[in-house]
Amino acid sequence: MLIEEFNLTGDPALVRLAEVVHAADVSEDRDSSAEGPGLYAIAHGFALLHGTNDHAKIELETPMYDALYAWCQDQVSARA
């Protein structure tokens, strides 16, 4: 995963987020995280709505990923 390649493993919430994103992005690993299929569906929905307009997709998706990261922070702090 890119998180390991760029040595970003010091933040447990970021590691958790990377697991979810990986599951959404890699069809063979879709079920490796329970949230993967949902994130895939949402991201695919953005693609259906906005096609190749990457700027619009990034602008609209960024708050969703911020919220998902906040959720990951909450999840890892609850386990600590």
Image (cartoon, rainbow, N blue to C red):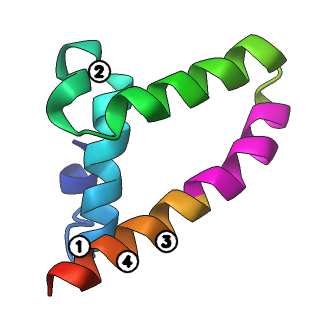
Q: Are marks 4 and 1 in contact (CB under 8 Å)?
A: no
Residue type at mark 3 is: Ala
Q: Residues within 10 Å of mark 4 (few under 14, many from 20)?
A: few
Precedes in sequence: disc 4 or disc 1: 1
Residue type at mark 1 is: Pro
- Image x and y of residue 48, in percent: 73, 12
Precedes in sequence: disc 2 or disc 3: 2
Q: Secondary structure at mark 1?
A: helix
The residue that appears at 35% across and 55% down in the rendered structure is 17
| Residue beneath disc 2 | 26
| Residue beneath disc 3 | 70
- Image quadrant holding the N terminus, namely top left
Q: Which residues are magenta?
A: 55-65
- Image x and y of residue 70, in percent: 49, 71
- Of labels 2 and 3, the one closer to you: 3
The image's mark for residue 38 is none
Q: Is 13 placed above or below 78 here?
A: above
- Of labels 4 and 1, the one closer to you: 4
- Residue at mark 1 to residue at mark 3: CA–CA distance: 12 Å
- Residue at mark 4 to residue at mark 1: CA–CA distance: 11 Å
Q: Are marks 3 and 4 in contact (CB under 8 Å)?
A: yes
- Residue at mark 1 to residue at mark 2: CA–CA distance: 21 Å
The image's mark for residue 12 is 1
